[in-house]
Amino acid sequence: MAPAGKVSEFCRQGNDWFCKAGLPSDITVVVDSVSFHLHKFPLISKCGKISHMYEESKSTRKSIFTAILEELPGGPDMFLIAAKFCYGMRVELTPRNVVIVYCAADYLEMTDEYGEGNLLSKSESCFHKNVLHNWKDSILALQSCETVIERAEKLHIVNKCVNAISVMVCTDPSLFGWPMMMYGSLQSPGGSILWNGINTGARIRSSESNWWFEDISYLSVSLFERLIKTMETRGIRPENLVGAIMHYTRKYLPGLGRWQGGQHGIPRTVTSFSLTPIALDQRVVLESIEKLLPLKKGKSFCRFLLGLLRVALILGVSQTCKDALERRIGMQLELATLDGLLIPTYSDTDALYDSDCVERIIHHFMSSESKATPFSPSSFDMETSPSSRPLQKVAKLVDSYIAEVASDVTLKPGKIRSLAEALPESSRTLYDGLYRSLDIYFKAHPWLSNKEKEDLCSIIDFQKLSIDACSHASQNERLPLRVVLQVLFFEQMHLRTALAGCLHGLETQSGPAGPATVPGDMAGQIIQRDGWVTMVRENRVLKVDMEKMRSRVGELEEEFSKIKQEMKKVSKSHSSLSSPRVVGRRIGCSLLSRPSDAKPDTVESTRPSPRSSVEQARPSTLHYRHKKISL
């Protein structure tokens, strides 16, 4: 548009704008307390709104007509551009102002009815032909819609920008004819790196799909939310959407980075965009982001949710938002870590950790019906497998959590009990972790009465304690006497079971190794082979049990001393080989038999014998040894 001959420039004096055209102004346009002293003919010929206002004011019109424009999109700056256009001056339409000019032209009714190629058609053509086909311009245009959102919605500008951006995200960037900033290097449409506009031939090796995260993070919350929903309807992978949401959240919630293990993705520069970060209310950001999160589960995603919950407690968001976050975490509690669950208390209470929040999360885990589906295996480092047991993982996690918070002197016994009983008994195969937690709690709370300690110990199934835990508990001075007796009882049962297995193994080794009396040599060999395989397995288990029984050797020494006394009595009675058999029966072992010509002796014992056995004949050397013993 060529400039008019008499119009040289617009100048400003305070809140007044003047047009140096060599003629006195006969119309005044007021926009937000800023007055424009202009001329009627250029404005009325191009601007339909001012033309209507001028016609309606004929009856009351004075020498200088005054038009007051309320709620003009863009305010005085946009009217200045429209006025320059009316005077035939050159105006520059950029991706940053084209949307606002478009809305202002629509407000001023600068249609082709008031002159061919008017401002409305010019701005609309620039928007559709230039802006919507360029990634950078679409982002800038969508960001500028925030100030004129109502008029932009009316003209469907927001929908067009959002749809264009969604299509570009779903499409390979190398197919577009627009250079873009990727990972700090300007990239050509073919994917090569540009240096001062020259194609270097080097290719960007990264195949990451997060190149658009940073660009859309400059949008307002409402526009970002709308863009994410549009992308979701277009079928963009949930992993990419969650990645964009997490990137956006970390940018506007700085406190979230304290509980995150590092930033994901490759940082990129946007100096060519000249975008400026927007000021957002962190509470609004968090409540809006929570609604965008999908029902998915992943290890990194769970860590992000736990960090989001901490920030929510600090900011004091609505109870609905906090409940929703706790419910989302409960759906994937088996993927959480101990440091993530250690949520400090941000209220006025004296407690160090918010155990009430963790208890609610556990209840959500128990009541959830696995609505959350996992991400793809390559996304968010999922570490679950079909054979994993979420309930057992959560039980170990809860036991570790109780052990960590047990040192808090303000923690009540009822809270410990409610946390432990939030999971069913079937979730714990061993109660060693819970016993360790209670021991730490008793050590940090020495003023507890025996009744309170007994009530807490009642949540432990002592039959599911390991031998090491039983040994520790039997010597633990912090436990009540009744509990120690109960532990000793179950420990004795464990020892008897282990000793019976040991003696059974000895009997199996000393027993006859001949083939079983089954018709057919092959069947006998199979039975004999299976017996040896079973015995080898039992011996392996026996070795492990014997290692655990070392701590109880002192008690067994008393039993062996009694056996020695019995041996001395037997040697004095000058009986035959039957006396050692009596002793052998008392300890549960099978002794070697006497010669075939000797008669078996019958010995009556006051203790019940576990079994009676018929011994086979042995070589004469063994017979000589037995005689030597009976002398």
Image (tube, helix red, strand yellow):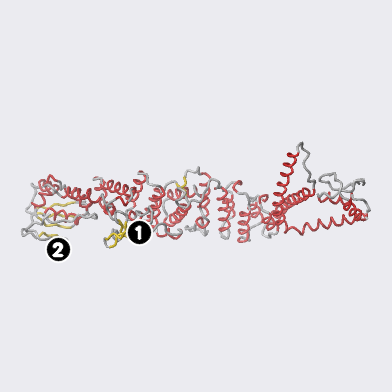
Image: 160 above or below 3: above
**Quarter-of-image position of residue 219:** bottom left
* Gap in angstroms between the C-alphas marked 2 and 1: 46 Å
Using the image, tell me which numbered label, if any, was put on residue 592: none
Q: Position of residue 162 (x, y in %)?
A: 30, 48
Q: Is residue 570 shown left or right of residue 325?
A: right
Query: What amino acid is labelled 1 in the image?
Result: Tyr
Residue farthest to the front, as pictured: 521
Label 1 element class: loop
Q: Quadrant of the C terminus?
A: bottom right
Label 2 element class: strand
Residue located beneath label 1 in the image: 183
Q: Is residue 360 shown left or right of residue 441?
A: left
Query: What amino acid is labelled 2 in the image?
Result: Gln
Residue located beneath label 2 in the image: 13
Q: Quadrant of the N terminus?
A: bottom left
